[in-house]
Structure formats: C-alpha cells, structure tokens
Image: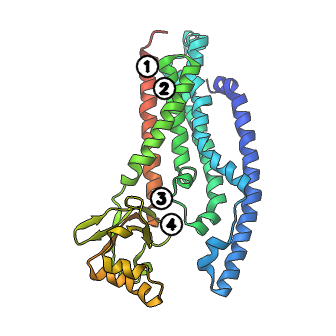
Amino acid sequence: MTWVVWRQHRNQAYIAAAALAAFAVLMLVTGLQMASEYRSALGLCAASHSCSNLASTLNLENSAVSAVVTLTVVVPCLLGVFWGGPLVARECETGTSQFAWMQGISRTRWLAVTVGWTMLAAAAWGGAVSALVTWWSSPVNSLNLQNFQPSQFDIQGTVPMGYAVFAVALGIAAGALVRRTLPAMAITVVVFTLVRLLVSEDFRSHFITPVTKTLNFLLHARAILPTGSYWMVSSGLVGPSGPVRSGPLNGGPSLTFDGVPIPVSELPSACRTLLFQTSTKSASGFPSCLAAHGYHAVLSYQPADRYWAFQGIETGIFILLAAILIAVTAIVVRRRDA
C-alpha cells in the first residue's frame, strides 16, 4: 500500500523537493551574507558605543528576497489545496478508492496509509521551510526585535508546521465531504484563511494573560519599559477620573509619550502650556506635571521570553484541529456507501 501511495504522488513529491532545494539555496546564500554583515556592524558599533542606533542605520534585508520569505506564509495553504484537497476527492471522482476496497484493502487501512504519509510529508515540508526562514531571519529579528510581529510570527518557529498539517487535514476532510476536487480546494482556501485570521487576530493575545505595568512619569520611563522583542498588547493613559481616550480627539493633536498615545486636549491646561513651550526646562517639567496631576501610563504586554510558549500553544491548537478533521474524515469514509 505504501508503494502504491508513492507511485500515485511521486510527481508531487519531486516538484516539492525541487522547490524546497531551490529555496534552501536562496536562504543559505543570502542568509550567510546577511549574518556576516550583521556581525561586522555589531562589532563596529560596540567599539564606538553606538549600538542603540544600529536598527535605524543598518539595513540587512534585500527587498526581493524578503518578499520571497514573506510569501512563505501561503505555503501551508498551498499544501492543503494541492495535496489535501484532491487526496480523497479525486479518489471518489475516479472510483479508484472503490477499486482498492474491492481488492481486499479495507477503508481504514487505505485511509490510514494514504492520509498518514501525506500528513507526514506536509509536516516535514512545512517544518523545513520554517526552519530555513527562522535561521535566515535571526539577524533581522535581533536587529529589529520583531519576533512577535504577525508577519514574522506566522512564518517562523513551529507554527508553520502546525498550519501545514491543519491545511492538509482540512483539504482531506473537505474532499471526503463534498467528493469533488475543485470545490474541496476552494473550501480549503476559504476555511483555512478564516481560521488563521480568527486565531491570530482574536485568540492569540489571550493565550497567556499579559503582564500589566504602570509607568510613573516621575521615573525614567526607559528603565521600566519592557526589553527585548516583546509584544505590546495595549497601552493607555490613566488620570484621576480614569482611563483617558487614546489617539487624536476630534481631529486635534496628540502626543506619544514612550509609546503611550496622549490626546493633548485631554491633558491639564498647566501641562499643555509646558508642552508647547520651547525651553528645555519646560519640556523636562512636562512629565512631572502629569505625575503631579495624578496621571500615569499603563502598559499591557507579552514579554519576549514567552515567544516559544506562544509558538507551542498555537502549533498545538492547529494540530488538534487537524486531528479532529482527520477523525471526521475517517467517520465519513467508513460510513459512506462505496
């Protein structure tokens, strides 16, 4: 049975292997060059004690290569569409599954072998692409502290492997339910996109309760702000009467104080006067004025050291969803008339 699966899908395997090899060469050549540039720049700035400005002065990424890396976000969906969607649907359309069952191969065995090898290949391919992207991105991550940004989080670490397994399982389940290849492929694209957006936009920030920190304007703000590649979930200004509305109010000017948006019209008049004066003494007295009037900033964030915990949680969610979809597929295949 394993040999039959290989004979059926070997062309897909060859194409995938060739694409992966080409991508690996691109990542290795450009990644080594980028890592060398980063190490050299880091050594120079350490000697001149100017590394705090390195992120604004050093540009490591090649725009064309960066675009290719960003586009790897669609790899799991492509695996689901072209590997998962046709897997069962095409067998049903052509009747080859019925032929296999008439030859003494049970539906359970046929499904276990076919789906098992496909899921394993998807996990391996998604993991290989993610490993290359993670290695290639490490200098840029260190420079820009961007690990938690959705554009980076979704293509690095372990989550692309979870996405790939889920996408293929979704395609297989859709094919088993509708028994038509093209509708199964379309369903895979739509449902996969919706689930991914739902998890990243609505659920991800709630995986672990964020850390909340109060910023006292009388202290040096940078001393108590988070460090490293943290994820700022929310920030705001709290006054004597409660939270202050963030962002520009009625189109008026706003001030960003260490990442906290402050509508100028919501500030005490005495502090507004200090803000718009040009003298150094007035500018330095602005934070003290806010503190004296009972204002402080509240930051809610995920620390940098939770990155791999978030990766593990999200990967686990998509693997669990994949297991549920495969269970549904097994039930449908075993109960539906041949």
Q: Nearer the viewer, mark 1 or mark 3?
A: 3
* Mark 1 lies on residue: 332
Residue 171: horizontal and vertical position, in percent?
Answer: 53, 28
Based on the displayed image, in which of its 4 quarters is residue 137 positioned?
bottom right
Residue 5: horizontal and vertical position, in percent?
Answer: 64, 25
Secondary structure beneath dot 2 equals helix
Q: Which mark is residue 173?
A: 2
Q: Which mark is residue 308?
A: 3
Secondary structure beneath dot 4 equals loop
- Disc 1 residue type (three-letter): Val
Q: Which mark is residue 229?
A: 4
Task: Return the residue nearer the eye: 251 or 129.
Answer: 251
- Observer able to see residue 112: no
Q: Earlier in the sequence, mark 3 or mark 4?
A: 4
Based on the displayed image, in which of its 4 quarters is residue 321 positioned?
top left
Do the residues bearing badges 2 and 1 touch, measured as CB atoms within 8 Å? yes
Q: CA distance from mark 1 to mark 4?
A: 45 Å
Q: Which mark is residue 206?
A: none
Number of residues whose C-alpha sits closer than 10 Å to that of mark 2, classed few (under 14), some (14–19) or many (20 or more): many
Q: Residue at x 64, y 45 (%)?
A: 71
Number of residues whose C-alpha sits closer than 10 Å to that of mark 1, classed few (under 14), some (14–19) or many (20 or more): some
Q: Nearer the viewer, mark 1 or mark 4?
A: 4
Q: Earlier in the sequence, mark 3 or mark 2?
A: 2
- Left or right, residue 214 beside residue 325: left
Q: CA distance from mark 1 to mark 3?
A: 36 Å
